[in-house]
């Protein structure tokens, strides 16, 4: 299973960082060849299922994810979101935690995933690609242009 962790510090308050990083449809603007569909008009909460579709035409696949924990930040309490990937191609889980800090907030994204039919020796490649792609997603969503990868 490929595992990667991304951390970012931002001057944004925790509630605003949370709002941005859990805006699922907005993630697609930063991931190549991907669209994300979220149930219309429903707030995100435990049990919400949304689908990321990646690829072109017949080479596309769906990556359905279910929110299994939803606890927005409040006051000095961190926000925690847990997702389970339930697709035929991509399996695993992701967690997004947003911690309030004196200077804004600290966002931690950890993803564990496996891609069917990809041998385990490919895990380091998937981890590296995940860090780069999702690092850019976080930088863009938190308005951190040119911050590089951490």
Image: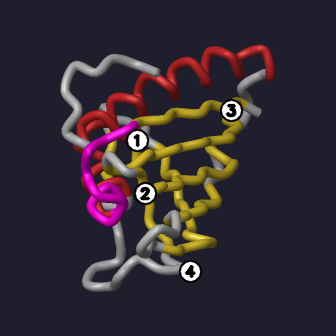
- At mark 1, the secondary structure is strand
Please provide percent x and percent y for residue 6: 51, 33
Q: Residue at x 70, y 17 (%)?
A: 122
Instruction: Name the residue carrying label 2.
Output: 100
| Number of the front mark, 1 or 4 | 4
Q: CA distance from mark 3 to mark 4?
A: 24 Å
Q: Nearer the viewer, mark 2 or mark 4?
A: 2
Q: Residue at x 61, y 24 (%)?
A: 127
Q: Is residue 118 part of the magenta span, yes or no? A: no
User: Residue 97 in the image: x percent, y percent?
Assistant: 53, 55
Residue 107 located left or right of residue 15: right
Q: Earlier in the sequence, mark 2 or mark 3?
A: 3
Q: Which mark is residue 64?
A: none
- Which residue in the structure is indicated by mark 3? 3
Q: Earlier in the sequence, mark 2 or mark 4?
A: 4
The residue tagged 1 is: 54
How far apart are labels 1 and 4 at the CA level?
22 Å
135 or 124: which is nearer to us?
135
Q: Are marks 1 and 2 in contact (CB under 8 Å)?
A: no
Counting residues from the N terminus, which is met first, the one under dot 1 or under dot 2? 1
Residue at numbered disc 4:
47
Q: Is residue 69 above or below residue 104?
A: below
Label 4: few (<14), some (14–19) or many (≥20) C-alpha neighbours in 10 Å? few
Q: Kindly state the secondary structure of the residue where label 2 is placed.
A: strand
Outermost residue toward the front?
A: 102
Q: Which region is colored magenta? A: 9-18
Q: From the image, state whether disc 2 or disc 3 is nearer to you.
A: 2
The image position of residue 39, as x and y in percent, is 35, 77
Q: Position of residue 142 (x, y in %)?
A: 26, 43
Q: Residue at x 33, y 42 (%)?
A: 34
Question: Distance from label 2 to label 3 (Cα)?
Answer: 25 Å
């Amino acid at each position: 299973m490929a595992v990667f962790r991304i951390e970012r510090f931002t001057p944004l308050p925790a509630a605003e960082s949370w709002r941005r990083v859990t805006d699922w449809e907005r993630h697609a603007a930063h991931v190549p060849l991907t669209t994300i569909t979220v149930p219309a008009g429903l707030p995100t909460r435990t049990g919400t299922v949304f689908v990321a579709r990646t690829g072109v035409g017949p080479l596309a696949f769906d990556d359905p994810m279910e929110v299994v924990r939803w606890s927005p930040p409040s006051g000095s309490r961190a926000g925690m979101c847990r997702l389970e990937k339930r697709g035929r191609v991509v399996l695993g889980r992701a967690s997004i935690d947003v911690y309030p800090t004196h200077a804004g907030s600290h966002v931690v994204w950890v993803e564990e995933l496996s891609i069917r039919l990809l041998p385990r020796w490919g895990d380091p490649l998937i981890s590296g690609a995940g860090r780069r792609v999702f690092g850019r997603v976080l930088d863009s969503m938190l308005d951190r242009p040119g911050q590089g990868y951490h």
